Amino acid sequence: MLKDLRFADYFLFTQHSLETFEKCPLKFKKRYLEGLRWESILDESIKERLEIGNSFHLLAYRYFLGIEPGLEPGVKAYDKLSKWLNTLQTHFKKEDNALYLPEYKLRTAKGNLRLEANFDLLIVREGSIEIWDWKTQGESTGDAGINERLRERRLRESLQSKVYLFVLREQLKRVIQKGNENPQIKMCYWQPEPAKTITEIEYSQELHENFTELLESRINTILEYDYNRFDKEMYKKSCRSCEFNWFCNNTKVDYKSVEGDIDFLDGLCWDDIDEII
């Protein structure tokens, strides 16, 4: 009998795996426990947008490391990426007294709270640490004001915010120096076009206690879940954008129906396309 990876000490939960279980436990099982992946599942237009976003992440990574971006005319989406890079360099001028940690990974394990966070950027200053996350999908169509407020609230309440802030607070000793043991922690979401900080979250001990309880509850729910009682009808609304739709319903994913959905695009994991970084 195969070992249930949920209980393996080396199995770490991420924002994506927690979100996936919430959308559909069976998708979580197939993707994270059975390791199944469908190749070329994405519509070409969506795949192109994700690849441009991934390229921007690579440019930002190189910028904060202080190496040449390697962006040359002729590169796919050169004009857009060049504009985004210039915008990034304008809004994030590097300071001599700050430590920049791009594409930084932290892990924590305390009982069932086994979590991993992959940060786009950490900025460490005396007395403060900032988490920056890049959002490159832009804004959805419709009422811009309403969409903006909804997106801000969604990001503030997202599992990504909870996981990232919790993991950083638990692993502060790995990124700070002595004398800076109790820094102010803040998480910011930023987009290059139109260039702006979408929202900011000031962390606190109260939030940390709340997030600890919430994340522990989410993980315990996964650990206690009985797949013999899985009810497909409860999760059918997630089928339209699931790569396992063919397995469950003998139906292909209708990406035309979701390509304008900002929640769907933001929710896609970089693992869904070939890694560039």
Image (cartoon, helix red, strand yellow):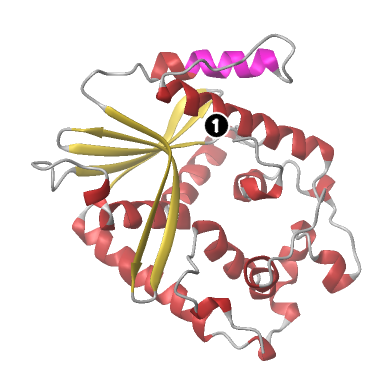
What type is the residue that disc 1 sits on?
A: His
Q: Quadrant of the C terminus?
A: top right
- Residue at 27% x, 58% y is 170
Q: Position of residue 105 (x, y in %)?
A: 42, 47
User: Magenta includes 83?
Assistant: yes
Q: Is residue 227 above or below residue 174?
A: below
| Left or right: where 251 falls relative to 150 | right
| Magenta-tinted stretch | 78-87
Q: Nearer the viewer, residue 106 or 217?
A: 106
Q: Residue at x 84, y 45 (%)?
A: 256
Query: Total number of numbered labels?
Result: 1
Which corner quadrant holds the N terminus?
A: bottom right
Q: Where does residue 213 sit, x and y in percent of width and height?
A: 32, 72
Which x, y percent locates residue 96?
24, 18
Q: Secondary structure at mark 1?
A: helix
Left/right of residue 269 with respect to residue 134 in the rendered view: right
Residue 273, x across and y down, in percent: 71, 44
Residue at the spot of label 1: 57
Crowding at mark 1 (Cα within 10 Å: few <14, some 14-19, many 20+)? many
Residue 21 in the image: above or below residue 71? below
Q: Quadrant of residue 229?
A: bottom right
- In this view, which residue lies farthest toward the left? 179
Name which quarter of the figure residue 215 lies in: bottom left
